[in-house]
Image (cartoon, helix red, strand yellow):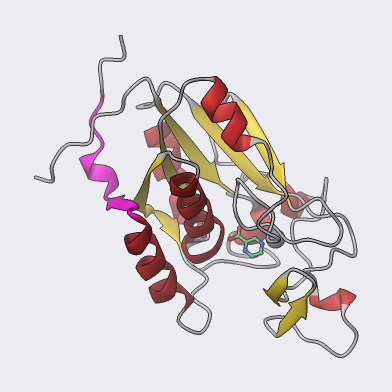
Amino acid sequence: MPTPFIPRRTDALIVVDVQNDFCPGGALAVPGGDEVVPVANRLARRFATTILTQDWHPPGHASFASSHPGRAPFDGVDMPYGPQILWPDHCVQATHGAALHAGLDIPMAELVIRKGFHPGIDSYSAFYENDRTTPTGLAGYLRERGFTRVVLVGLATDFCVAFSAEDAVRHGFAAVVVDDGCRAIDLDGSLNAARRRMADAGVTVIGSDAVAQPSLT
Ligand code: VGL
Ligand code: ZN
């Protein structure tokens, strides 16, 4: 038996980018992406508060390879704010691909935070855009509501989940990633790199079987 993880009132579960485009058949499909859905649904019933995030790009977004003539998806480019991987067009605002997976059954979610809507800046983290200075407002929301720890599941482990976990720590929150509630893109060793960065930052990694059903009183 793993050491039980007992959710507290001051924890927020964050379900990252469980959207059609990141699931099999989607424009930027993460292998096994849809397998996080039952884990997210189960965990949402063990936390007092769940927050969802949505990658939410305008058409022609700067992170799309199609916006860079002569470039292909997964090429790297230098943006004014630093290196950026180019992606296939994905999660375009109000399209089916941007919609949350239909199997996600989390009606109790208290906030949906959208990110990546600035035309010229990508956003992996739920806290900051990739320029590392434009905030999404999530840190202020969490702080104002008295949360001290975030627990993350979703897509993709090595991009949005990892960047969000690292930024949570940077903002003074404890961060816990539920490993089997995430799936990775794993581009050129990005999963191992993300695991190392998260460990260095002090992010805890647990399995969903460790999460106990608390008496949330
Ligand atoms: C993501 C690549 C591009 C993610 C979003 O949610 O991990 N990855 N946009
Ligand atoms: Zn994106």
Which residue is found at the position 69% from the left and 42% from the top? 136
Looking at the picture, tell me which residue is in the foreground, 76 or 15.
Answer: 76
What's the magenta region? 202-213
As drawn, 138 above or below 186: above
The answer, for residue 90, to whether it is visible in the render is yes
Quadrant the C terminus occupies: top left
Looking at the picture, tell me which residue is in the foreground, 87 or 94.
Answer: 87
As drawn, 4 above or below 176: above
- Is 24 contained in the magenta span? no
Residue 9 location, quadrant? top left
As drawn, 93 above or below 131: above
Residue 24 location, quadrant? bottom right
Which residue is found at the position 39% from the left and 23% from the top? 10
Whole-percent x and y of residue 121? 78, 61
- Image-quarter location of ligand 2: bottom right
Looking at the picture, tell me which residue is in the foreground, 166 or 159.
Answer: 166
Q: Is residue 40 left or right of residue 121?
A: left
The answer, for residue 106, to whether it is visible in the render is no
- Is 211 contained in the magenta span? yes
Whole-percent x and y of residue 20? 65, 54
Whole-percent x and y of residue 84? 69, 74
Whole-percent x and y of residue 163? 53, 57
Residue extending farthest to the bottom is: 70
